[in-house]
Image (spheres, rainbow, N blue to C red):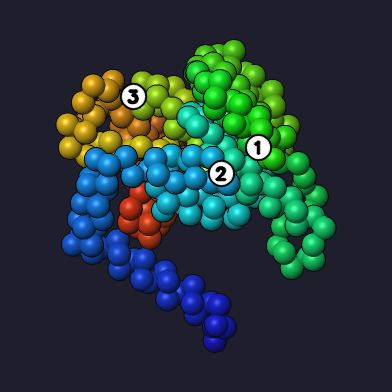
Amino acid sequence: MTMNDLEEFAETRRKEIEGIAIDESTKTMAMGFLVETIKHNYSYHFDWLGVPIIQYPQDIVAMQEIIWRVQPDVIIETGIARGGSLVFSASMLALIDSCEDRKPECGMDVARSRRRVIGVDIDIRKHNRDALDAHPLRDRMELIEGSSIDPDIVQLVKSHIRSGSRVVICLDSNHTHEHVLAELNAYAGLVSSGSYCIVFDTIIEDLPNKLSENRPWGNGNNPKTAVYEFLKTHTEFEIDRTIQDKLLVTVAPDGYLKRL
């Protein structure tokens, strides 16, 4: 069967990404970029709609693709920091909802509306909360202060999710093996089929250990080790390596977990 232009473009792109996956010199160069830029707090230098978003731009683009494709009703984020990631998620959800009044070719499920992001942090500092409270997208953000693995907090998060909701989860708080594994066990079951649980900072396992000095995490004790442990008993998830292959630069290698 003859492919149309869009199909040909998609197939060409797929083959190019497969080529990146086996190009060790290019991947080594990308890792070098990560190691060098981390020294300069590179991920701290970007905003989303006026609020600092502490992520690498490549991972922001990947999140945009996932959110647009999955069309979640709820995004759960552990770790709020300065709030830019919440604003990013809220803006994507607002954009999806805006399609309700548009033409059918927009491609969205118009039956769903008022999508929201739930942010959990053990310490939401006043200046960060004030910045979020003043943001135009504040009505799409639910802020919950407390430990993301506290059973009461977990239950509170779950209480905000209606039955049948499509859910994306982003884990980006305490980066120790124990904490991330507890988060995965607490929240991953909420992820919808075909959706994602994204575990950030799995890159810690691949970086020189000196970059984690004075931190409770490091080589052998980090989000990636937690992911590997979790996957031993949760075959309903798989690592979507096509994402990291095309990004090249990502803080979440082996951290984009897709629910089958």
What residue would you read off at disc 3? 176
Describe residue 53's horizontal placement relative to residue 69 as left or right: left
* Image quadrant occupied by the N terminus: bottom right
Q: Residue at x 24, y 29 (%)?
A: 212
| Quadrant hosting residue 135 | top right
Earlier in the chain: of badge 3 and badge 2, it is: 2
Q: Earlier in the sequence, mark 3 or mark 1?
A: 1
Which residue is drawn at the image coordinates 69% and 23% (left, top)?
Answer: 159
Where is residue 65 drawn, in percent x and y?
Answer: 53, 55
User: Residue 22's mark?
Assistant: none
Q: Which residue is mark 2?
A: 50
Q: Judge whether 126 appears above or below 96 on screen.
A: above
**At 74% from the left edge and 50% from the top edge, which residue is drawn?**
97
> Is residue 42 something one can see in this rendering?
yes
Q: Is residue 236 visible?
A: no
The answer to the question of whether label 1 and label 2 lie on touching residues, with beta carbons closer than 8 A, is yes
Residue 222's spot in the image, x, y percent? 31, 29
| Mark 1 element type | loop
Q: Amino acid at mark 3?
A: Thr
* Residue at disc 2, secondary structure: loop
Q: Residues under labels 3 and 1: Cα distance?
A: 32 Å
Disc number lying in front (3 or 2): 2
* Of residues 24 and 251, the one drawn nearer to the viewer in this rendering: 251
Task: Give the percent coordinates (x, y) of residue 217.
Answer: 28, 25
99 horizontally vs 32: left or right: right
Q: Nearer the viewer, mark 3 or mark 1?
A: 1
Q: Which mark is residue 135?
A: 1
Q: Residues within 10 Å of mark 3 (few under 14, many from 20)?
A: many
Q: Mark 1 vs mark 2: which is more N-terminal?
A: 2
Alpha-carbon span between mark 3 and mark 2: 30 Å
